Image (cartoon, rainbow, N blue to C red):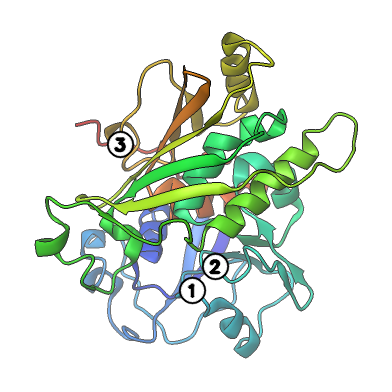
Amino acid sequence: MIQVSIAGGSGYTAGEILRLLVRHPQVEIKSVSSTTSAGERIDTVHRDLLGETDLIFTREVGDADVLFLCLGHGLSQEFLYTHSISQDCRVVDLGNDFRNKPRFDDREFIYGITELNRARIRKSHSVANPGCLATSIILAMAPLAALGLIVDDMHAHTVTGSTGAGRIPNDWTHYSYREANVTIYKNFEHQHIEEIMGALNAVAVEGRADGEKAGALPPLQWVPMRGPFTRGIIASVYTKWNGTISEEALIKHFCDFYESSAFVHVSEKQVSLKEVVNTNKCLLHVEFHNGYVHVTSVIDNLLKGASGQAVQNMNVMCGLDETLGLQLKGTAF
């Protein structure tokens, strides 16, 4: 059995990891640390786990084979500085500390879009789990980047659920503000832009058959929005289409690109949040309009956008079937 510890156990992402791992056939949860809830039963914070675990929050993390860092953004590096973590321990960081700066002492964090970096993740002991919004956009655009077909600005509009802002309440997550309301935030300057462009540029380089270094991709023009729902992300992403291959061939390329993926699927029909919420899936729909190629991408922000992808990466690092613990029932309606 794989021994797992979780640091920062009282938040949304840690709660989702716990829900997945209590049912995982190859995992034993060794410790779950929380500075705010130490000494309390886990099911007093994550109340849906009543009857599924008797674990108690600890102040310190125990030694383990795998450590999930579910700390606030900017706190993972501090945690690793102040704690002695064995080099044999595999670390999955759900914060943003190592997405754009992957080196930490002797560790190199691999960017954890599993479908793009599976081989590197399999050999790694450290993974920087991607941001939820970044995941939705990268999976939509990666097949285009791989063929060198992004020749003009990418445009994205995303709508995300309130859980993406974390457990600590604020004005933007308050029910009386969020309900029946949609707002724009961080337009054209969201912190995920750097990791999105880094991932897509890496795909563009790897996709070149001639081995030559590709030039930087055109920029991403992105308007993020908050939606009146708790979980899920829908991303509408489009760019100019130069028609160098047929529409049918491009859709086939999308299907082929994700052929080995258990969780990313291309749909012939329009997709919606109801089809992915409470699953680790990403569904894509590709269409063409007046010289543009448009991709709709939907994910659950807490699963494929965070904890589900983290467990998927753990499975890959540990040589397991990457679907273990992740064959989940969707909401559907």
Classify 10 Å Cα crowding around label 3: few (below 14), some (14-19), many (20 and above): many
In depth, the one of 280 and 293 nearer the eye is: 293
Left or right? Give the position of 100 relative to 52.
Answer: right
The percent position of residue 201, horizontal first and vertical second, equals: 71, 46
Q: Amino acid at mark 1?
A: His
Quickly name the residue at label 2: 96
The percent position of residue 179, horizontal first and vertical second, equals: 12, 54
Give me the C-alpha separation between circle 3 and circle 2: 25 Å
Q: Which quarter of the image is occupied by the N terminus?
A: bottom right
Q: Which mark is residue 16?
A: none
Question: Which residue lies at the image location 61% right of the left edge and 17% below the top edge?
Answer: 250
Quickly name the residue at label 3: 273
Q: Amino acid at mark 2?
A: Asn
Nearer-N-terminus badge (3/2): 2
Question: Which residue lies at the image location 71% right of the left edge and 49% below the top edge?
Answer: 122
Q: Are marks 1 and 3 in contact (CB under 8 Å)?
A: no
Quickly name the residue at label 1: 73
Question: Which residue lies at the image location 46% right of the left edge and 49% below the top edge?
Answer: 222
Q: Which quarter of the image is occupied by the C terminus?
A: top left
